[in-house]
Image: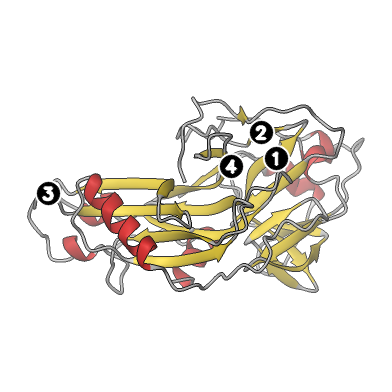
Amino acid sequence: MKKIIIPVVAAMLAITGCSGANNGNNTANKTEGNGEAPVYCFVGGILAGSWENGQWVSHNDVDGNMDENSGHQYKIGEVLSVDGYNMWYNEELEGKGDTLIYYGGYGNDGMDNFSTEGEDGSRSIKMPVDKDSALAQLDFPQYAFYSRFSYDNDNFDNVSVSTDKNIAPENVNTKAKPSEASKNAIKEYLEKNGITTAPNLTQCFEADFDGDGKLEQIVAANTPKNENYVPSFVEDGTKETDGIGSYAVALFVDDNGSAKPVFSEIRPFEGEENAYMHYNQNIVINGVYDINGDGNYDVCIVYADWENGHVLVSAMDEKGDYQTVLRGNFGA
């Protein structure tokens, strides 16, 4: 069967992380700017967007538009004029990468004239890029631009940001055991949306995410799949069955047991041919960080479908609900 083999998805399959309304805009949660430098954010090797002048600016439309030209068009001089990107993994700082390594994408032809080719066919650009250079004037590719930051000859594509501030929550447990409240929350959420497929929790993060002094959990759940990553309920050509379907869900579970969706993609099974393609979605939480410094923690996610997907950042709004504020698209 055909599968996408790209750095983002390969990383997802090796790990065994939200979608909210933003009315299709590329900016949200506006506050007064404080004159600080923008914070650019990469998730899973894809530029998701930035926090600047007191607002989120998304690289691609947060409303689900997969068009390669949707969203905010950055210039290379904006994104790569910094001296490097701090690279985070499991809520720990791994180091600072001063070289962007990329593997292709749409609209990157002009970059090749300014980059160095590696033995593996990748290309690299050393930072900081001079803002007055010809390279700085080029558009930063908006679709399927897979990149990594180097650090001591190691490549990194989990979560990378252009700020030197500590963005990790204190005392976070990235491999926490899901509480009974979290298990029940996932089960009830699926049932509420008409899905009786068995809950399959794949990740659990535990910390004081909302600053109230109490522990909360953020959990991810994905449809059970076989060794070929095919959803188990379509493995043998299962006929349409009430309540069966696929899901990729992340929930924030408060200390009182109440839950709110961080990301939700649910598809009731309708008996299509080649169903393994339509139902082969997967979510991985790449980390939970305070990217904009507001004291609340933002969930960084990689979501993959059969031949496309996106990375995103979901942030808590003033009502305590999670909204997708940053997004970057990729695909075959």
Between disc 2 and disc 4, the foreground one is 2
Report which residue position mark 2 lands on.
Answer: 57
What is the distance, in whole Å, between disc 3 and disc 4 at their CAs?
35 Å
- Residue, disc 4: 106
Give the mark, 2 or 4, whose residue is nearer the N terminus: 2
**Mark in the foreground, 1 or 3:** 1
Q: Residue at x 62, y 62 (%)?
A: 158
First in residue order: circle 1 vs circle 4 = 1
Task: Tell me whether the residue at label 3 lies in contact with that at label 2, contact meaning CB atoms closer than 8 angstroms.
Answer: no
Identified at 28% across, 67% down, the residue is 225
Is 63 located above or below residue 291 in the figure?
above
Q: Residue at x 38, y 61 (%)?
A: 182
In this view, 23 is above or below 297: above
Q: Which residue is mark 1?
A: 50
Q: Judge left or right: residue 10 versus residue 87.
A: left
Q: Secondary structure at mark 2?
A: strand
Residue 138 vs 161, above or below: the answer is above
The amino acid marked with disc number 3 is Gly
**Nearer the N terminus, badge 1 or badge 3?**
1
Quarter of the picture containing the N terminus is bottom left
Find disc 3 in the rendering and name its residue: 271
Residue 112 is situated, as x and y percent measured from the top left of the image, at 73, 48
- For the image shown, how many numbered marks are present on the structure? 4
Label 1 crowd (10 A; few <14 / some 14-19 / many >=20): many
